Image (cartoon, rainbow, N blue to C red):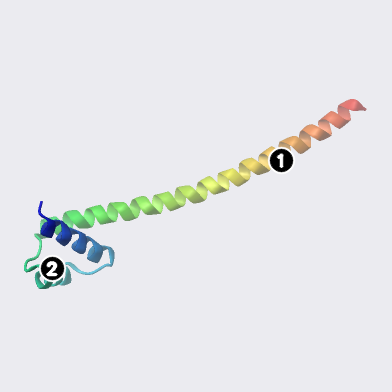
């Protein structure tokens, strides 16, 4: 794949990420590079863009859930030691 084709794909991908319709992308590619891309290539590129967006959403959700789990674990740890201290005090009596 030549530099021009690679640049074209990057340019098209960025437009897809921005939500630009296929027709406009084709026009912009023709204007900038002298030719467009096949609709199959654009559809495949759109599929990859959609997959990346979905993975990004999953990462954000997972990070949120992980932070929540860390806070809960910290709380349970704190409660465990408080309960342990109370039981130890009662056992001394």
Q: Position of residue 80 (x, y in %)?
A: 72, 36
- Numbered badge on residue 46: none
Q: In the figure, is residue 86 to the left or right of 14?
A: right
Q: Position of residue 60 (x, y in %)?
A: 44, 53
Q: Position of residue 75 (x, y in %)?
A: 67, 43
Seen at 10% across and 51% down, the residue is 1
Seen at 17% across and 53% down, the residue is 44
Q: In the rendered image, which quarter is residue 14 located in?
A: bottom left
Q: Residue furthest left?
A: 34
Q: In the figure, is residue 6 to the left or right of 74?
A: left
Q: Position of residue 40 (x, y in %)?
A: 11, 56
Q: Residues within 10 Å of mark 1 (few under 14, many from 20)?
A: few
Q: In the rendered image, which quarter is residue 57 located in?
A: bottom left
Vertical relation: 41 (above or below) 92:
below
Q: In the rendered image, which quarter is residue 19 located in?
A: bottom left
Inter-mark Cα distance, 1 to 2: 60 Å
Q: Which residue is mark 1?
A: 78
- Kindly state the secondary structure of the residue where label 2 is placed: helix
- Give the number of the mark in front: 1 or 2: 2
Q: Residue furthest right?
A: 93
Question: Residue 45 versus residue 91: which sits nearer the camera?
Answer: 45
Seen at 15% across and 71% down, the residue is 28
Vertical relation: 8 (above or below) 31:
above
Q: Locate the C terminus by quadrant.
A: top right
Question: Residue 39 versus residue 34: which sits nearer the camera?
Answer: 34
- Mark 1 / mark 2, whichever is N-terminal: 2
Q: Which residue is mark 2?
A: 29
- Do the residues under discs 1 and 2 have CB atoms within 8 angstroms? no
Q: Residues within 10 Å of mark 2 (few under 14, many from 20)?
A: some
- Kindly state the secondary structure of the residue where label 1 is placed: helix
Seen at 19% across and 56% down, the residue is 45
Q: Residue furthest front?
A: 3
């Amino acid at each position: 794949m030549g530099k021009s084709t690679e640049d074209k794909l990057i340019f098209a991908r960025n437009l897809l990420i921005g939500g630009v319709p296929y027709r406009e992308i084709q026009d912009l590619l023709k204007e900038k590079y002298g030719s467009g891309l096949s609709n199959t290539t654009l559809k495949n590129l759109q599929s990859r863009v959609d997959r990346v967006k979905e993975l990004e959403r999953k990462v954000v959700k997972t990070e949120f859930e992980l932070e929540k789990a860390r806070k809960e674990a910290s709380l349970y740890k704190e409660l465990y030691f408080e309960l342990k201290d109370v039981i130890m005090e009662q056992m001394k009596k």
